[in-house]
Amino acid sequence: MRQQIPTVQMQQIFDAQAPIALRLRSSTAAERIEKIRKLRDAVIAHTEDWYRAAYADFKKPAGEVDLAEILPICIEANDAIRNLKKWMKPQRVWPTLLTLGTRSYVQSMPRGRCLIIGPFNYPVNLTLGPLISAIAAGNTAIVKPSELTPHLSGLIAKVVREVFSENEVAVIEGEADVAQGLQALPFDHVFFTGSPAIGKHVMAAAAKNLASVTLELGGKSPTIVDATANLKLAARNIIWSKFANSGQTCIAPDHVYVHESIKDTWLELCKKEIRKAYGANLKDQSSSPHLAHMVNARHTARIKHLLEDATARGARTLDGGGVDESTCFVQPTLLDQIPADAKIMEEEIFGPLLPIIGFADLDEVIAKVNEGPKPLAFYIYSQSNANIEKTLTHITSGGACVNHSLMQFLQGNLPFGGVNNSGIGRAHGHYGFKEFSHERGVVKTQFAFAAMLMMPGQVLPIMRKALKAGFKFL
């Protein structure tokens, strides 16, 4: 059991960062870039350690560590290194008619002391990625990694301590009560990645200090495979994106609507993809080097309960369905004929169970999706431009992808985040920099035209003349 950090020590670390946060307001792009480069290089230098830690926590394959943990950090860091000077440069704004004679610009100011609360599913990527944005914007940070992945969390702490002093970036490990203790401190910004249920508590705690928040949450991200889709492509991509990290991915396809005319053919292709990628049975799949396990016994039991509830209500298991609670393993599972009142259709699955729902009318699918909270992701596989545009127009989601899945996360030039129940705020690249910055509007007067409007007795006559001249847009 890792020793808990007392509240007094949290306060001391938080207080020690106050003068550093003030000094960092004037830090240069070169200074920030050097820190980001050192963090990136430290992450790469510990590649073999990441492999071992990820396997120890939940048997995450090394290939997934490369693709979904280390690579995104390198992309995020390299983007900041290349572009930070441009991001920090004040952005010129043209004057309005009422501000002629002034010079206006938007100045990016550091928010100050930031709290980053990381998740268990991609601990490196989703904890150190926001940290890079915080550093780029000139902030200090306290990082709270997930207690559910202790080996990865410990390594995150080690890497951060190699690069930063505690009064600039500190890592505080511990259970949920540590996160709650940190949230009581008056941070300037809180970046949280996790479930919508916990996100509400984080937002409520931040509101007590009027701190700004970024909430990267989740939801039941739907996928549509219509009658025109490339079925082999749809099967390969959906199987990969759903069962990577054992389904513990916030933007994974949660359930799939498949057109009735191609449903059986597509399902057979999915079964072939599962066998080709992971093996033909429970024994082979549980020992596959390409499948992660559930993070702990509690999450395994939750997924097992969802499966049992669905089948008890009449759902049909098309493939998989095996669970080994002793090793926290759940087979990649395809389900059909799921009743609407099954729990698996009400909550985010976050595990390797994939409900398949046949449809005949695309409008009915759109209506069904819109009945629920807005999801973090939406995917459509189609070769019909009309269907693609129709769904993108009428379905709201944090991000979307056409004829692929998860790629919107890897495109670092796009904003990443949710909408309403699936999240607040944006991450990645310039959007992450802006999220950790306060954009301050600045006006500098260059000659006295604007000042004339402030002279007693001058405003009303000038406005009357302007209105008579037709400038009603003033």
Image (cartoon, rainbow, N blue to C red):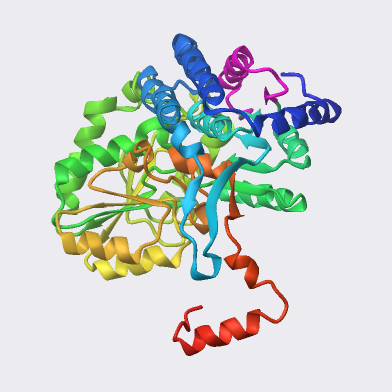
The foreground one among 438 and 326 is: 438
Residue most extreme to the right: 8
Q: Nearest the camera: 291 or 199?
A: 199
Query: Is residue 167 located in the magenta-colored stretch of the structure?
Result: yes
From the viewer's side, name the closer residue of 357 and 102: 102
Residue 284 visible in the picture: yes
Q: Where is residue 48 drawn, in percent x and y? A: 45, 9
Q: Is residue 309 left or right of residue 384?
A: right
Q: Is residue 269 magenta?
A: no
Q: For residue 218, say whether it is visible.
A: no
Question: Residue at image x 47%, y 79%?
Answer: 473
Location of residue 115 in the rendering, given as x and y in whole percent from the top left corner: 66, 36
Q: Is residue 220 above or below residue 329?
A: below
Quadrant of image for the N terminus = top right
Residue 130 is situated, as x and y percent measured from the top left of the image, at 54, 34
Q: Which residues are magenta?
A: 146-173
Please name the residue shown 68% across and 49% down the image.
201
Classify residue 216 as left or right of residue 48. Answer: right
Residue drawn where x is 55% and y is 44% of the image: 435
In the rendered structure, the answer to whether residue 71 lies left or right of residue 215 reads left
Q: Which residue is painted at 32% across and 21% down in the image?
A: 284
Compared with 115, 228 (above or below) is: below
Q: Where is residue 441? Give x, y as percent.
A: 59, 53
For residue 369, above or below residue 468: above
